Image (cartoon, rainbow, N blue to C red):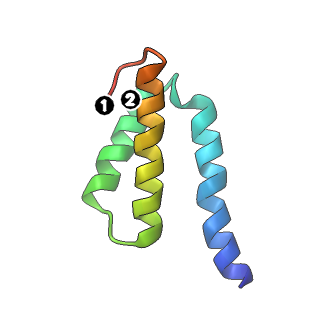
Amino acid sequence: MELQLTVFCVPILLLFALFSIACQNVFEVCTALGSCRKHSDSELRITFCKTMDTLAEQCSHAGYIHC
């Protein structure tokens, strides 16, 4: 159970870190998203990619370049 929680929490923490810098670093987000789309093999990665997609959308709504 503890391991599952760690596996789940680490990407969430990474997302928060990404969120704080994402709109200043749209290129990195887009690169990560592109890589994600090519390698979406697990449920967790698919969820992560969907979140990244949403993040990219939010950045584009805020006036940043969309991927």
Q: Which of disc 1 and disc 2 is earlier in sequence?
A: 2
Indicate the secondary structure of the residue bearing disc 2: helix
Quadrant of the image containing the C terminus: top left
Taking the spot 62% from the left edge, 55% from the top edge, the residue there is 12
Quadrant of the image containing the N terminus: bottom right
Q: Residues within 10 Å of mark 1 (few under 14, many from 20)?
A: some
Depicted 46 relative to depicted 14: above or below: below
**Who is closer to the viewer here, 58 or 37?**
58
Residue kind at label 1, given as amino acid type: Cys
> In this image, 36 relative to 1: left or right?
left
Taking the spot 36% from the left edge, 36% from the top edge, the residue there is 30
**Who is closer to the viewer here, 7 or 59?**
59
Taking the spot 64% from the left edge, 61% from the top edge, the residue there is 10
Taking the spot 43% from the left edge, 27% from the top edge, the residue there is 26
> In this image, 51 relative to 17: left or right?
left
Depicted 34 relative to depicted 44: above or below: above
Residue 42 figure quarter:
bottom left
Tell me where residue 21 appears, x and y as whole percent.
Answer: 58, 30
Tell me where residue 38 appears, x and y as whole percent.
Answer: 25, 57
Residue 27 is labelled as: 2
Residue kind at label 2, given as amino acid type: Phe
Indicate the secondary structure of the residue bearing disc 1: loop
Tell me where residue 34 appears, x and y as whole percent.
Answer: 29, 45
Depicted 17 relative to depicted 1: above or below: above
**Who is closer to the viewer here, 20 or 58?**
58
Depicted 3 relative to depicted 32: above or below: below
Q: Which residue is mark 1?
A: 67
